[in-house]
Amino acid sequence: MGVYLRKSVRVGPFRFNLSKSGVGISAGIKGFRIGTGPRGNYVHMGVGGIYYRATIPSAHPSSPQQRAARPIPQQVPASPSIDPTLGAMIEIASADASQIVDSSSRALIDELNAKHKKWRFWPGSAALFLALIAYGFANDWETWAQVLLLVAGSTATAFLYVKDDLRKSTVLMYDLDSQMETAYTRLHEAANALATCARTWHIQSSAKVYDSKYHAGAGAVVKRLNATIRKASPPFLKTNVETYTIGLGKRSLHFLPDRLFIYDGSGIGAINYRDLDINIRAAKFIETSGVPSDAQVVERTWQYVNKKGGPDKRFKNNREIPVCLYEEVEFSSATGINELLQLSRTGGGQELRAAVSEMGMKTLSAT
């Protein structure tokens, strides 16, 4: 599979065009457009160097934070009651995204966060005009007045929607040389392999088991939620390349050619691939939520086990439980990334780690 690389990106009525001289901007309609350039943010990837043109340069201190992850063998309910057979749940989570910024990403991230914090006006406009239309309908306004209000409200809301898109969007254009494009294609292929897994989970926290008899012989339990891996662009980041996104609940990871972007409720962060650590391990998991179609069942256990690992006959309806071989992909960095992904099929994580390592080497050689 190849990477689709566009030469232009549209933001509202404007079009950003990539050429040998840089990035230009034009506006108008088909057959009649006016423009100027170079403008916007521009990244050139390859042996010639990496260049970024920031429109809002500034600096803010960062506060790195790290938490250690531990092996994961069994799932527990999302809100378990106090259980004397378990230890405390230890959260597996990154620092706030706005704190995860390396020095090479600071100017770009400052701009993204500044625009991310701007209010959107169109929802308020839509709510106001809907309230006026409802008021007019309830008070039997003339039909022409209601129609006029509807047209005016729709026009104003559409205008504000476009304006909000322009105010909050950052344009990032990539010009990849052949070597960088090949490396980015491998990254896409690796991400696509992960996306084809029957199930993908985000491990949120884990706890040590004090009495494994009540937990199918497990040494630890976890809380996990479904994760998503798909092609999707980062919010309000307009770019000319296709990107893969890993959705981890309220947090998402976005793989672009020069760095990994992290989005969450606190804001946006980024890290260069050469500073991202990806650890892969195969893990046996006691599966109580149904075996995925591509999972490998390697053992069997029981809901309640005796000291020898067999079924504890003191418990009625002691059901047999499959033990699956899953793959865990751990993302970490010195700046605070700490995320754990669980895949129902083994093998894909190694390809992703190799592709990310290659991207890191390419960006290092280009600086």
Image: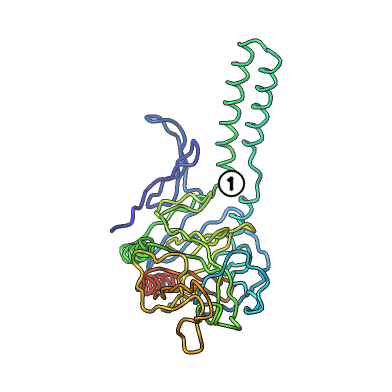
Which residue is drawn at the image coordinates 40% and 74% (left, top)?
324
* Mark 1 neighbour density, 10 Å: few (under 14) some (14–19) many (20 or more): many
Which residue is drawn at the image coordinates 59% and 73% (left, top)?
335
Q: Quadrant of residue 16?
A: top left
**Residue 67 seen anywhere in this rendered image of the structure:** yes
Residue 171: image x %, image y %?
50, 50
Q: Quadrant of residue 323?
A: bottom left
User: Badge 1 is on which residue?
Assistant: 168
Does 359 sit above or below residue 174?
below
What SS does tag 1 mark? helix
Q: How is the image coloured?
A: rainbow
Q: Out of 269 and 154, give the one closest to the viewer.
A: 154
Residue 85: image x %, image y %?
63, 79
Which residue is drawn at the image coordinates 58% and 63% (left, top)?
269
- Total labels: the figure holds 1
Outermost left residue: 1
Outermost bottom residue: 308
Q: Quadrant of the C terminus?
A: bottom left
Q: Quadrant of the N terminus?
A: bottom left
Residue 174: image x %, image y %?
42, 56
Label 1 amino acid? Lys
As drawn, is 345 to the left or to the right of 86? left
Residue 15: image x %, image y %?
45, 41
Does 290 sit above or below residue 136?
below
**Residue 103 seen anywhere in this rendered image of the structure:** no
As drawn, is 238 to the left or to the right of 68? left
As drawn, is 331 to the left or to the right of 152? left
Q: Out of 58 and 229, give the one closest to the viewer.
A: 229
